[in-house]
Amino acid sequence: MASQRQVAEAPNIWAVAQQQFDEAAEKLDLDDGLRRVLRVPKRELTVNFPVTMDDGHVEVFTGYRVQHNLARGPAKGGIRYHQDVTLDEVRALAMWMTWKCACVNIPYGGGKGGVIVDPKKLTLRELEGLTRRFTTEISPLIGPDRDIPAPDVNTNAQTMAWIMDTFSMHNGYTISGVVTGKPIAIGGSLGRNEATARGTVFTLLQASEVLGVPIRGARVAIQGFGNAGSIAATLLAQEGATVVAVSDSSGGIVNPKGLDPSKVNAWKREHGTVVGFPRSETISNADVLEADCDVLVPAALENQITTHNASRVRARIVAEAANGPTTPEADEILNERGVFMIPDILCNAGGVTVSYFEWVQDMQSFFWTEERINESLKGIMDRAFGSVYEMSQRHEVAMRTAAYMVAVNRVAEATTLRGLYP
């Protein structure tokens, strides 16, 4: 995470999402009425719900579920637990999910959910109570044919198991397809845990090919050493890259000669942070973004690359494993400096793609091998990168604008074909 000052000065994330949409709509010369439809969420639910804490007292929490667009299929999107969750943030993330699903051409619309809570302050029993009660409150909206949640910031496979069980209990039978990112034992998919990172690496390999910047020997810095960041580090090291800097919420570490991702992982498991890793220098989380590297992977929270630091980003390629880590103003600065951006709605879509595979497997009660999953993921990510890169070349626009143009065009077409009801 960047410094508090930096985050405080960052723009409203919902305004950013709408601005990105407006730019793509303008380039596509979209009809005004269609713009008005696609610019706002279809549905927003705010819930305030009580949870009995371990000591017997009752706390009331606020949560949200937003569905942005359902023209191409059921809503799809994660649920995050974070003390800074806002309705505007959830709106933006829901909209981004619409474009992300359309960008990789899977049959979903965009949704997102969140609860305002610092989960680190809750016990496991309290977290389960909160999750089950929140599920009950949003249950009128969710379902395998309507809206399919998944893990996001501070939620995981166990959280999804609780949601699936609660929803199933309400209906009297097991409905495994209501969420994705579940444990394998109850209908989860092989390869789902690594999917976001693997998709990021597939897009990086494509970018390295079109730019002539080999990944073998490339120096990589990764902000955020959680699920996506740590697995991306491992996969990139396997491709011959040198990971020179990583960070988590406590701070960062750097070693120009390279860090061994598996050893950093082991250190983090033991100490709860990457900071203090032997033979590394401690730096701030924000410093990782400015590290001397060829490839930068922001894999933490949104609004990390801003006007304050964009001019100091030294990477040749930025691969957005996180959602919305770069502000529009920073985007312009990076673009002018010739930095090649793999935008979030393309770069980190591996997660939702394998979530789609999981849902398909649940609906069919027929499960695939990990090899088939990774092969199918590569096919989808490679095709998506190709569509976006071709759009960027044809219209002479940056990759982010191109990704939005591909995605918005697909959603606009579906919306137009379906027409307005009644």
Image: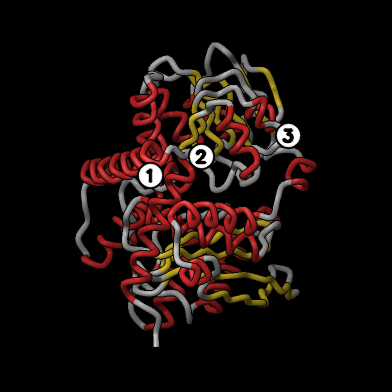
Circles 1 and 3: CB atoms closer than 8 Å: no
Alpha-carbon neighbours of circle 2 within 10 Å: few (<14), some, or many (≥20)? Answer: many
Secondary structure of the residue carrying numbered label 2? loop
Foreground mark, 2 or 3? 3
> Is residue 266 among the parts visible in the rendering?
no
Residue located 73% across and 45% down the image: 7
Image: 20 above or below 263: below
Q: Position of residue 383 (x, y in %)?
A: 28, 43
For residue 320, the mark is 2
Q: Position of residue 175 (x, y in %)?
A: 34, 73
Alpha-carbon neighbours of circle 3 within 10 Å: few (<14), some, or many (≥20)? Answer: few
Q: Position of residue 282 (x, y in %)?
A: 69, 22
Q: Circle 1 sits on which residue?
A: 195
Q: In this orientation, which residue lies closer to the viewer: 108 or 169? A: 108
Q: Disc 2 to disc 3, how far (Cα)?
A: 18 Å
Label whose residue precedes the other's in the sequence (2 or 3): 3
Secondary structure of the residue carrying numbered label 3? loop
Circles 1 and 2: CB atoms closer than 8 Å: no
Q: Give, as a three-letter code, the residue at label 2.
A: Glu
Q: Give, as a three-letter code, the residue at label 3.
A: His
Q: In this orientation, which residue lies closer to the viewer: 336 or 82? A: 336
> Is residue 413 among the parts visible in the rendering?
yes
Label whose residue precedes the other's in the sequence (1 or 3): 1
Q: Disc 1 to disc 3, how far (Cα)?
A: 32 Å
- Quarter occupied by the C terminus: bottom left
Image: 291 above or below 45: above
In the rendered structure, the answer to whether residue 192 lies left or right of residue 4 reads left
Residue located 19% across and 60% down the image: 366
Q: Circle 3 sits on which residue?
A: 308
